[in-house]
Image (cartoon, rainbow, N blue to C red):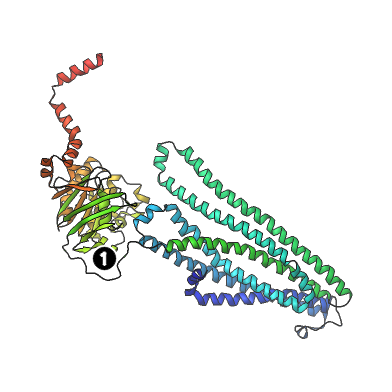
Amino acid sequence: MRRLLTYLWPYRLLVAGALVFLILNAVLQVAGPLLTKVAIDRYLAPNPERIQTPVDPFLSADPLTGLTQVAMIYLVALFGIFVFEFAQMYIMQYIGQKAMFDLRREVMTHLQKLDVGFYDRNPVGRLVTRVTTDVDVLNELFASGLVTILSDLLALSFVVFTMFKLSPALTVIVLAVMPLVILATALFRRAVANSYRRIRVAIARINSYLQEHIVGIAVLQLFNREKKSAQEFDEINRQHMLAFKDTIVAYGWFYPVVEFLSALAIAAILSYGGWRVERGEITIGVVVAFLQYATRFFRPIQDLSEKYNILQSAMASSERVFKLLDTKVEIAAPGTEVETLDAVSRIEFDHVWFAYKDEDWVLRDVSFRIDPGETIAVVGHTGAGKTTLISLLLRFYDVQKGSIRVGGVDIRQLDPRELRRRFGVVLQDPYLFTGSIEDNIRLGTDDITAEQIAAAAEQVNLMDFIRSLPEGFAQPIRERGSSLSTGQKQLISFARALAHNPRFLILDEATSSVDTETELRVREALGAMVEGRTSIVIAHRLSTIQRADRILVMHKGQLRESGPHQELLTLRGIYWKLYQLQYKDQELTNKLKLVPQSQIKESASLWNKL
């Protein structure tokens, strides 16, 4: 709670104003029954021996005039209650939204700093729940929970104080049922707190499941898994429903119990108060005032019970939000400044070992060097560790053993943002954001001009496609670029990398998901893209890397071969085997072309007879 309240500190003046309105509202809440008592005792059932109250001297002795005056004062009090309650609720709702805006911004900023390994361990749906549902619960606490708790406590304090001033004996009768109310409240609180906890867990599971299955809807429909998916979702949804049912049951018995206890207190007030009125010890106005105060006494208790559950729910949500905020940023800038990377920098992998989990090594003692301006290709079987090399170089993960240096500086001594700013990366699966094509190429870098964007698009052979669009670079793109083909998205990714004019260029299977025509266009642009840059190309298609200065062959996490294309072929090692496997089909096709057509027809006829 102390940590949550720090989000209110920037708005402390507004909070102070809300508290002032809160106190004024609580004072006026007490005035109504007192005015009722005055009206009854002075004008409706006068008692000559009554004790004069402070308000009496200002009232007329004439019954009609006096009742009119009391009614007008009551009306002013009601209007004041309306104004003060509206003011404090408006201010607190405003403060709550501002505080939640700050909290959401802090969570989003922190999420962007966390390493990729964190997202490997945490489902997206769960993180979305932290930023949306959990923060909304905290907003409810700030906007209404805390204020209502303070309002109810103040109202209870003023009511009890006023009742004691009017009649200590009747006050004791009202308070006599409090142990039973406290017992019922404790049982209710325990039941609802457990249910709210289950509700939050169920909501997180629902969000996670929906996110995963909506993103993968094409695969879901392709394999006719709709029915199975619906059954799984029904089970998750049922857990949420059952948890809510438990809260309904708890609310169902709690409010009637409190109402019954308050009715008992009112009955006791009528009995004992009537007996004392007959004896002349108190006035009828006091009894009527107590009946009103008893109602106003139990209503805040009911509200406090409900708001306590909001408090409990907020504590559970804040625990999850703060746990996320307290997640240590594993990959961060060092505490001390290091020199800025030179314009010409060498990349070195020095005996690098890496495992995603424990000692299940993905890379084993990998060492190589990339000189400035050199184009290096990395090949190998699936799972050989090719993409892991790039993830380590960009410092999405940190190595367990060895080191990676850029310009002679260990990348662990560099700010990750400063390091990544120098790299242009084109991934196998191009990712586009909602917006325009220009927005996706610029990607928030304001100093990239429209001319630079057009030049980058021209360089990667994207301009023909841009010219065919009604709005050109301003053409809107839906989520993940769903309105574009894979090839078009890939060309936009190439233009994005070039527009940022990176010192280093990384192409990770950049042509594996495009058609042959697009690949040829990309290959034409590759020469211009890598010119003057240090480039790393990861590819399955060996045709795209034959012109590389050197080819690194990865096998089972180890660097097994290194050299130019022709040199590796003469070694007749792993690269040669990859080359043979990839071009076997092409060679078979070429051999078939040499077979006479008559022989092919004769073989086909014989096959048909068989």
Residue at numbered disc 1: 413
Q: Position of residue 394 (x, y in %)?
A: 27, 57
Q: In which image quadrant can residue 18 be found?
A: bottom right
Residue 339 in view in this figure = yes
- Tell which residue pokes out farthest to the front in this image: 359
Q: Residue 165, relative to residue 227: is it above or below?
A: below
**Is disc 1 placed on a helix, strand or loop?**
helix
In percent of width and height, residue 564 lies at 12, 47
What is the x, y in percent for residue 464?
23, 48
Quarter-wise, where is residue 276 in the image?
bottom right
Out of 557 and 486, give the one closest to the viewer.
557
Tell me the residue at 61%/71% (across/down): 150
Label tally: 1
Single out the residue that lies furthest toward the top: 609
- Residue 12: x and y, percent? 51, 76
Could you tell whether 56 is left or right of 374 in the image?
right
Q: Is residue 69 visible?
A: no
589 vs 254, nearest the viewer: 254
**Is residue 392 found left or right of 273 in the rendered image?**
left
